[in-house]
Image (cartoon, grey):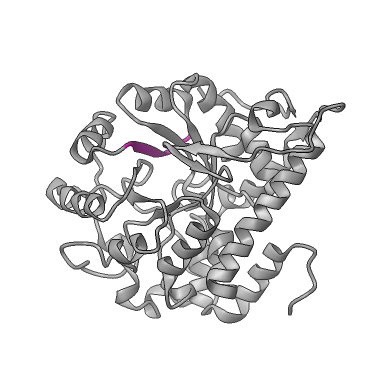
Amino acid sequence: MTGTHARWLDEAQERARDVLAPAVLRYIAEGAREEVTLGEAEAAWRAVRLLPRVLRDVRTIDTTADLLGTSSPLPLGIAPMSLQRAAHPDGEVAMARAAAEVGVPLVLSSNAGSTFADVAATGVTWWMQLYASPDRDLTAGLLEDAVTQGASAIVLTVDTPVVGTRYPAPEGGSVWDVADRSWVGVNARTPPVGVSPKDRDKAMDLVPEDLGRFSEMTGLPVVAKGVLRGDDAARAVDAGAAAVWVSNHGGRQLDQVASTASCLPHVVGAVAGRAPVFVDGGVRSGLHAMVALALGATGVFVGRPMFYALASDGVDGVRRALLELGTELEESMRLAGAASAADLAGVVSGPERPDLR
């Protein structure tokens, strides 16, 4: 069914349900265990209340952002996701083309089904998301290849020493019953043992010093992704992180962790301007993105909606999704009396948040 939603992004999700295999749809939509964190993500952004300013000149709205040294027309980016070739035959390449056309960065999963070279050929600004391996030689090889193909940053996922448990869907079946091996891990120098992330061990010995080591190894800025606590954020910056990314892995790792909306102010406060702070998790509109900026984020990354947009309409769908978010952001800023992200300081009013330091 199409044409029933006021927002195209909502319609794209509905269209994706018609084209994705049920097991793939479940894999993208699912969260860890009882999905408590997953269920709270979007509501946490909606719970934030605003105190808009008035009598402000908002004829011109500046939505540009400096994202790790690259000027972007929007403070948005595409979060890393695997199995994009299950959404569209061109997978990450199609996603990259749309990101390049809009001018926002793409974060490419370690488990991507498209090669670094093919993604880079689109001209997109791309960052490599890294699951560090217990075998640091394997990690070093992957990083070397990413640098060779033009990655401009490394996004180290720090919240995945193991893959969190996700319960089977009531109707049964697994995405790995339908997933093609070519959809996963094509950039690994050693072919993956299996298609499931559980088949590939993650480093359980990551320490803050690894951030500096990976930066020195690659010559690139390294982002610590998966930080929810202020004290961890401060340690990451002290150890050389170029940015901190507030994320709970889309509710797919430890269940019952706090929402990113509630954690963001504490991380921003702990970092104290020494590094940019990015955020993802439950962002479903330009208004949500504006709330994140008002809470101190420099960049806002979106995952699942981009996957649905890719499944719905390929490159055109992702482009349209990004532009719709941008249009919503611009309107929200005008209504908040903010001509730029800097003008959003003080616009948020509540709610009370727990002390997560």
95 or 192, nearer to the observer: 95
Q: Position of residue 271 (x, y in %)?
A: 47, 22
147 or 7, nearer to the observer: 147
Q: Main secondary structure of the magenta part?
A: strand
Residue at point 56% right, 33% down? 297
Q: Is residue 96 found left or right of 54 in the rendered image?
A: left
Whether residue 333 appears in this view of the structure is: yes
Farthest residue in the front direction? 60
Q: Which of the 4 image quarters holds residue 117?
A: bottom left
Q: Position of residue 175 (x, y in %)?
A: 42, 73
Is 46 situated above or below 123? above
Q: What stretch of residues is rendered in magenta? A: 221-228
Residue at point 26% right, 63% down? 199
Q: Is residue 223 highlighted in magenta?
A: yes
298 or 174, nearer to the observer: 298
Is 33 situated above or below 70? below
Residue at point 79% right, 35% down? 58
Q: Is residue 259 found left or right of 6 in the rendered image?
A: left
Q: Which of the 4 image quarters holds residue 10?
A: bottom right
Numbered disc total: 0
Residue at point 34% right, 45% down? 152
Farthest residue in the left direction? 137
Q: Is residue 243 highlighted in magenta?
A: no
Q: Is residue 108 found left or right of 10 in the rendered image?
A: left
Whether residue 44 appears in this view of the structure is: no
Is 208 situated above or below 161? above
